[in-house]
Amino acid sequence: MGLNINGSTIRGMLLAATGAGFLVFMLLILKTVLFPSAIQEISNSGSKEQSMLFGGKLGEFREDTPVPLPGNNFGGIACFPNGGFAVTTDTSLLVFSSEKKLADTISLPSLAECIAAGDNRTIYLGMGDHVEVLSLVLKKTEEWTSLGEKSIISSIAADKDHVFVADAGEKQVVVFDTGGRLLRFIRETDKGPFLLPGTAFDLAIVAGNKLAVVDPGRHRVLLMDYSGNKLWQFGFAATALAGFMGCCNPVHIAVMDDGSFITFEKGVRRLKIYDEKGEFKSLVANSSSFHETVSTPEIAVSSQGEILILDPFMKSVRFFVIKEAVEK
């Protein structure tokens, strides 16, 4: 039932409200008049395009059994091309098999905030201002040159020839070859430098020698070639599920084998999937799926189509799977 409030009604109610009650009442009036959609009942049976803040249809995905993790501080997560995944916690790299069993634990000098899995069982570690390369076969680590004292490495992605580093401190993408030779910096977009209100700056490799890079201050994801030229973009600011909400979203991105994009928004805590053209496809998980302290959890996707979430509150890796894939 709609709420019909005219000027006479508001004046009469304001005259009756005094003291502390006046302030509370005014806040309720403003919320009702300016943000009527925010007080609608949240329902999982709603349309995908409803302008709900936290709701949405969740029926397409199910959550599998999580894998608990030791430690108190959690960094990055990455999936291996042939199955299995790796996670950094405290001062360790934890390597899990394709059966989700802990296969190896390797000591690190400090917490690696982000990681990427390369060819030949190689792990690239974001260690603050520099990259370290760990061979899981040789159990040997190589340290690359520092990017500078202001650098904050927030994401890494690698293919057989390149390593791409998102540097939130300097608001740049740094491109290396796999031997650590600096190839180029990507510092400009079609609208100037990347707009990063915080340190959430993520990227992922897309098939066909392309990069997906978040530009959270502009509520969009940029698709670029390896030289940094913009190809296209998707995303816009909106509370609707198809858009990105808040000051600066999305904060994380991953790409599935079929070209679909997985995004995570902080604040509202929405995990979503877009198709290969950037069209909104489905809500995977909403705010009710995460504790309020979970702000920017790392995400990854496996070759089996699983969406992995490194959840610091639950101290576990969580797995979301399309129901159809599970039932087959």
Image (cartoon, rainbow, N blue to C red):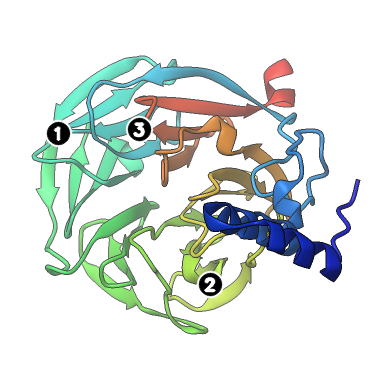
Instruction: From the viewer's perspective, tell me whether residue 184 is left or right of residue 219.
Output: left
Q: Secondary structure at mark 2?
A: helix
Q: Earlier in the sequence, mark 1 or mark 2?
A: 1
Give the x, y percent position of residue 255: 55, 48
Q: Which mark is residue 312?
A: 3
Q: Position of residue 232 (x, y in %)?
A: 62, 72
Q: In the image, what residue occupies the spot 83% across and 44% down?
A: 47
User: Which of 107/83 is in front?
Assistant: 107
Q: Please, is residue 69 above or below residue 217 in the view? A: above
Residue 232 in the image: above or below residue 87:
below
* Left or right: 200 in relation to 211: left
* Label 1 secondary element: loop
Q: Residues within 10 Å of mark 1 (few under 14, many from 20)?
A: some
Tell me residue 197's x, y (percent).
39, 68
Q: Name the N-terminal-most of marks 1 and 3.
A: 1
- Outermost residue on the right side: it is 1
Q: Residue at x 36, y 38 (%)?
A: 77
Residue 110: mark in rendering: none
Q: Please name the residue that numbered disc 2 is placed on.
A: 218
- Residue 241 in view: no
Out of 314 and 258, give the one closest to the viewer. 314
Quadrant in which the N terminus appears:
top right
Quarter occupied by residue 321: top right
Q: Residue at x 64, y 67 (%)?
A: 236
Q: Amino acid at mark 1?
A: Thr
Q: Which residue is mark 1?
A: 91
